[in-house]
Image: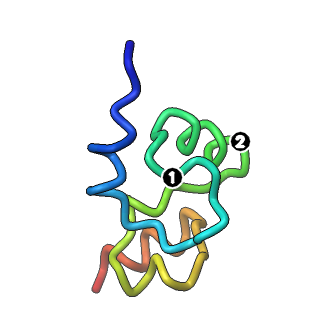
Amino acid sequence: MECKKTVNLKQCNCTYEPCSRKGVCCECIVYHRRAGELPACFFSAKAERTYDRSIQKFIADQGK
């Protein structure tokens, strides 16, 4: 399967600039899952900028 990085980047809300996984969703998901986290695309823009990718932050973000 071909990676659609160019298309993915248009929708990626990750603001962490040195990230090498931006636009490569499969790598991003694996990385954050191993860390017990969720990727930036699960969060609102405000919550994403905190760089807290925890499940607890995700739950709190959903209540707003």
* Residue under numbered circle 1: 22
| 41 on left or right of 56 | left
Q: The C terminus is located in which quarter?
A: bottom left
Residue type (three-letter) at the residue carrying disc 1: Lys
In this rendering, the label closer to the viewer, 1 or 2: 1
Q: Which mark is residue 14?
A: none
Taking depth in this image into account, of 55 and 8 the one nearest to the observer is: 8
| Separation of marks 1 and 2 at Cα, in angstroms | 17 Å
Residue 52 location, quadrant:
bottom right
Residue at 38% from the left image edge and 18% from the top image edge: 2
Dot 2, crowdedness within 10 Å: few (<14), some or many (≥20)?
few
Q: Please provide percent x and percent y for residue 13.
A: 37, 67
Residue type (three-letter) at the residue carrying disc 2: Arg
Residue at 30% from the left image edge and 80% from the top image edge: 63
Q: Please provide percent x and percent y for residue 53.
A: 58, 67
Pick whichever of labels 1 and 2 is earlier in the sequence. 1
Q: Please provide percent x and percent y for residue 5.
A: 39, 39
Q: Is residue 25 above or below residue 35?
A: above
Residue 44 location, quadrant:
bottom left
Q: Please provide percent x and percent y for residue 7.
A: 27, 43
Give the farthest residue toward the right.
Answer: 35
Give the farthest residue toward the front.
Answer: 6
* Residue under numbered circle 2: 34
Q: Secondary structure at mark 2?
A: helix
Dot 1, crowdedness within 10 Å: few (<14), some or many (≥20)?
many
Taking depth in this image into account, of 63 and 39 the one nearest to the observer is: 39
| 13 on left or right of 36 | left
Q: Is residue 45 above or below residue 23?
A: below
